[in-house]
């Protein structure tokens, strides 16, 4: 009996067709498909968590972070910035004021100190002058110095003040002479006079005697 041999058929090779997508390694070692960018613009901490002002950790773009102690009147503001004079925020215990400008003629100086007479800056609409103290042209209360203003200003050459009197002429003290008639004489003592010397001469010119002689 004869037997027919059957040859096994060859299998055609299977072609694995890949799609048009290509693979490449990204800079951080992760695979990207089709060139798609999977990165994020969110600033992250070393732990991968987004940076957050107020968590008590100084992170990217923060100058400080005191956690719950952040405040607009503290050393670290609510936006995690260091407090400074001129930022428009009054820091408790450090600044008396902060109007956020560099003007020295308003209520708050550029040094974050409340304006006052004697600080050397003329406060608009309130002070006529300010020479940081008494001067030849400015009184200690920041008014313009003038004879007859009722304010004794020795720096302006005044030795008396309070108006014209027999003692005080043009705000300068001077000696006076009276002819004695026997009638009482009333003298008005001007401001600035702390001592008076009275000399009385005898009617016949027989010498002189003063109030403080023995």
Image: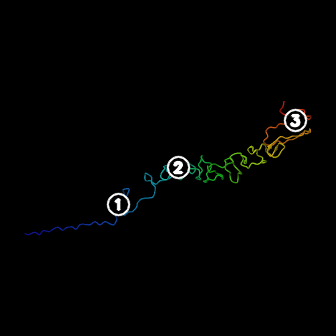
Viewport quadrant of the N terminus = bottom left
Give the residue number, with chain letter if any, for mark 1. Answer: 24
> Which residue position is annotated with label 3?
200
Where is residue 139 drawn, in percent x and y? 73, 47
What is the C-alpha distance between the residues marked 3 and 2? 83 Å
List the single residue furthest toward the left: 1
| Helix, strand or loop at mark 3 | strand
Residue 32 figure quarter: bottom left
Q: Which mark is drawn over residue 68?
A: 2
Would you call the spot at circle 2 few (<14 residues within 10 Å), some (14-19), or many (20 or more)? few
Q: Nearer the viewer, mark 1 or mark 3?
A: 3
Cα gap from disc 1 to disc 3, whole angstroms: 120 Å
Q: x, y (%) of residue 89?
A: 59, 52
Task: Say left or right for 40 vs 207.
Answer: left
Q: Are marks 3 and 2 in contact (CB under 8 Å)?
A: no
Mark before the other along the chain sequence, 1 or 2: 1
Relative to 105, is 42 on the left or the right?
left
Question: Dot 2: what SS?
Answer: helix
Q: Earlier in the sequence, mark 3 or mark 2?
A: 2
Q: Is residue 160 left or right of residue 55?
A: right
**Dot 3, how many residues are within 10 Å of its Cα: few (below 14), some (14-19), or many (20+)?**
few
Which image quadrant: the C terminus? top right
Residue 170 position, x and y percent, is 80, 46
Q: Is residue 91 left or right of residue 185?
A: left
């Amino acid at each position: 009996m004869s037997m027919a041999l059957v040859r096994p058929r060859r299998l055609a090779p299977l072609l694995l067709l890949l799609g048009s997508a290509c693979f490449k390694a990204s800079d951080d070692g992760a695979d990207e498909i089709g060139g798609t960018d999977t990165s994020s613009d969110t600033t992250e901490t070393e732990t991968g968590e987004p940076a957050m002002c107020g968590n008590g950790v100084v992170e990217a773009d923060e100058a400080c972070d005191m956690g719950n102690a952040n405040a607009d009147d503290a050393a670290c503001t609510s936006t995690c910035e260091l407090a400074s004079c001129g930022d428009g925020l009054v820091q408790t215990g450090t600044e008396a004021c902060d109007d956020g400008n560099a003007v020295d003629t308003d209520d708050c100086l550029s040094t974050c100190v409340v304006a006052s007479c004697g600080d050397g800056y003329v406060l608009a609409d309130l002070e006529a002058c300010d020479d940081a103290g008494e001067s030849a042209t400015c009184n200690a209360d920041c008014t313009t110095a003038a004879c007859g203003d009722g304010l004794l200003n020795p720096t302006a050459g005044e030795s008396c003040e309070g108006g014209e009197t027999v003692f005080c002429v043009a705000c300068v003290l001077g000696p006076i002479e009276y002819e004695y008639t026997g009638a009482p004489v009333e003298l008005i003592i001007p401001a600035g006079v702390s001592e008076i010397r009275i000399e009385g001469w005898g009617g016949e010119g027989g010498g002189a005697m003063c109030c403080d002689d023995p």
